[in-house]
């Protein structure tokens, strides 16, 4: 067991401490701490954590983490996570999120506007071609905030996926097609076109999980952001796109929406089919 006892009481005084998105029945223990070291090769984070009530006093420990987590986080980051035990008894952190009150409050302001836009839609209505894509603020696979406002003057492709999706015809195929469209656009000299994939599973898809997912597909993250964040913001986005999303056991049953948005944030092309064609979107993007 990799335990180093260090007093770390009172490390975190932030408001965000209590704003985790955890459910009562989530596995493991809620953990708050500060990263002391990142081991990229060993895939571990050394974290000085606060007391875990009824389980562990404050101490500094080495935790196993995912391959994306060692890319996203750095020494000094304040984090919240879930601590679980691997089968061999080793401690692992999952669902790791950086605590950043300033960024969180700025994102919340944007997402309040998103909620207002979603509320304005009468029931049964969604944003279609010709409508303005709503504002949102989510975190990408680098831990940076993404909002459509950052894309002013640049068209973007946007779709919805989640990393644990096992239906080969749904998310895995969509991601492959987005990745090939990214290549096709680059080959066509369409440098302005950007790509955004919104996670349908923000509770599981932390920035580190999305980082590992993008890497597994060999995706160049320069103009392709996988985003996640506030569950409520994702829910509102789903509503504006009229997506189905039903949680069933460990799975999420969902429909698809793939849109092309122009530099003025107007939706110019929208498909809800599994069979959406990258070539058709490429042609539409070329015409912008
Ligand atoms: Cu899926």
Image (cartoon, rainbow, N blue to C red):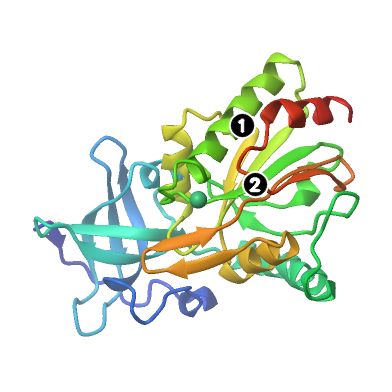
Q: Secondary structure at mark 2?
A: strand
Q: Which quadrant holds residue 53?
A: bottom left
Q: Is residue 232 left or right of residue 154?
A: left
Give the distance between the C-alpha atoms of the residues marked 1 and 2, in whole angstroms: 17 Å
The image position of residue 228, as x and y in percent, is 56, 56
Viewer-proximal residue among 266 and 64: 266
Q: Label 1 neighbourhood size at 10 Å, few (<14), some (14-19), many (20+)?
A: few
In terms of image quadrants, where is residue 241? bottom right
Q: Position of residue 34 (x, y in %)?
A: 37, 61
Give the residue pinned by disc 1.
Answer: 222
Which residue is the extreme one toward the bottom?
54
Does residue 112 sit above or below 163 in this rendering? below
Q: Which residue is mark 2?
A: 159
Q: Secondary structure at mark 1?
A: loop
Q: Nearer the viewer, residue 252 or 60?
A: 252
Q: Are there few (<14), some (14-19), or many (20+) residues within 10 Å of tag 2?
A: many
The residue lying at 27 percent from left, 66 percent from top is 83
């Amino acid at each position: 067991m990799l335990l180093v006892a260090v007093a770390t009481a009172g490390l975190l005084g932030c408001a965000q401490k209590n704003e985790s998105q955890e459910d009562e029945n989530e596995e493991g223990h809620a953990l708050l701490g500060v990263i002391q070291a990142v081991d990229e090769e060993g895939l571990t984070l050394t974290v000085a954590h606060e007391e875990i009530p009824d389980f562990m006093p404050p101490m500094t420990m080495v935790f196993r983490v995912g391959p994306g987590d060692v890319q996203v986080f750095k020494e000094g980051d304040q984090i919240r996570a879930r601590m679980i035990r691997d089968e061999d008894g080793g401690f692992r952190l999952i669902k790791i999120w950086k605590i950043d009150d300033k960024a969180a409050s700025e994102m919340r302001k944007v997402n309040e506007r998103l909620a207002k836009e979603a509320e304005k839609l009468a029931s049964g209505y969604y944003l279609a071609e010709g409508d303005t894509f709503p504002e949102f603020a989510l975190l990408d696979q680098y831990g940076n905030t993404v909002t459509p406002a950052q894309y002013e003057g640049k068209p973007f492709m946007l779709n919805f996926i989640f990393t644990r999706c096992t239906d080969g015809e749904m998310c895995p195929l969509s991601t492959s097609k987005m990745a090939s469209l990214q290549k096709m656009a680059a080959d066509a000299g369409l440098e302005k076109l950007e790509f955004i994939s919104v996670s349908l599973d923000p509770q599981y898809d932390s920035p580190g999980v999305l980082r590992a997912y993008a890497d597994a597909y060999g995706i160049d993250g320069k103009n392709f952001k996988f985003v996640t964040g506030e569950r409520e913001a994702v829910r509102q986005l789903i509503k504006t796109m009229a997506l189905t999303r039903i949680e069933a056991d460990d799975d999420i049953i969902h429909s698809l929406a793939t849109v092309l948005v122009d530099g003025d944030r107007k939706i110019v092309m929208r498909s809800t089919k599994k069979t959406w064609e990258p070539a058709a979107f490429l042609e539409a993007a070329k015409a912008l």
